[in-house]
Amino acid sequence: MTKRAPRGRYEATRLSVAALAIAALAAAWVAIAATADPADPAIAASPFGRQALLSAAGTPAVALDAAPPGAGRPERPKTTRTSRGS
Amino acid sequence: MSLRLVIALSLVAGLVLGTIVLAPVAHRLPSADGHGAWYASRAAGLVAYLFLWAALAGGLLMSSAWFDGIINRARLLAIHQSLSLAGLALALGHALVLIPDDWTRFGLLDLFVPFASYYARADAALGTLALYLFAIVTFSFWFRNAIGPVTWRWVHRASFVAYLAALWHGVRIGTDTRALPVTLLYLLTSSLVLGSLALRLTYVRPRRRPAARPPSRAAADPAG
């Protein structure tokens, strides 16, 4: 039978796990941000990267509709938010 | 393991990780090329996977009493719960941080309704389902008395399904899957889960010996 952790005890243990999670998240974020490069072939091979490259090359977003599923979504119309605000 | 040792180890691990990673690349931090949210989501996804794996493996080892005598059971339970909650928070963050991101353009429906994602529908859905399953398993602890130990145990077994779904989601559509450290991470963690599961399934809990009865007065003193 699993014993219940007494209420209010092991707070420092729980906080340590939370601190470890934050540290690990920060470390992973920095590692990814430092090594990632949108022009890198590995990143460009992902749909998001391909979408960015097509946008940069001036390819119309409509062309992406013809791509297989998962190849990226056409850009959202930006007018919705601005018209809501006016 | 004493409380001070746990705190010290956590701090040292955080410092070492931070120093190793931050030192050589700190100058690159300000420019994330506008993909900061996407990078944060990928990082959160990887760390969430790691924490949920640790929670699962810890739970397996705890239920087979392998840590008995090494670490206090109640403390191990506190660690197990905290890992689950932290992993769940990270997994939620992994999804939520994508909403304002202009790079990937996911909406609430894409992220939280299974099979509604515009991108890699089935693989993305497995991530959503894993999140929900892990949430149910994690929070079931606080409803154990209400649902009963048998149901609770079955709910807890669903964490294997959730783990497999999360692993599949990460391997299939994780951008970093092909990076060597991440490939190794997936291989190592899945092997350890299999190993822990094998240990758990083959573990035979030692039978408790009946408490020795004190000798009766007649037996102890036949003359009296």
Image (tube, rainbow, N blue to C red):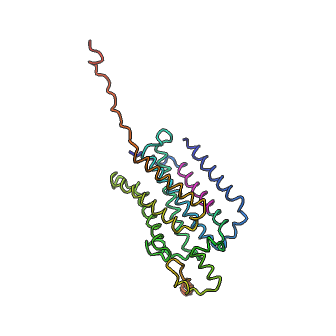
Magenta-drawn stretch, dominant element (helix, strand or loop): helix
- Asked whether the viewer can see residue A44, the reply is yes
Query: Which residue is at the front of the view, B142 or B162?
Result: B162
Name which residue lies at 55% across and 69% down. Answer: B97
Query: Which residue is at the front of the view, A28 or B202?
Result: B202
User: What is the quadrant of the N terminus of chain A in the image?
Assistant: top left
**Left or right for A55, reference B194:** right
Q: Is residue B41 magenta?
A: no
The answer to which image quadrant residue A52 occupies is bottom right
Q: Which percent across, then down, holds residue B10?
A: 59, 50
Name which residue lies at 60% across and 63% down. Answer: B179
Q: Which residues are magenta?
A: A13-28
Is A55 situated above or below B205?
A: below
- Asked whether the viewer can see residue B82, the reply is no
Q: Which percent across, then down, holds residue B84?
A: 48, 56
Name which residue lies at 44% across and 49% down. Answer: B60
Q: Is residue A21 magenta?
A: yes
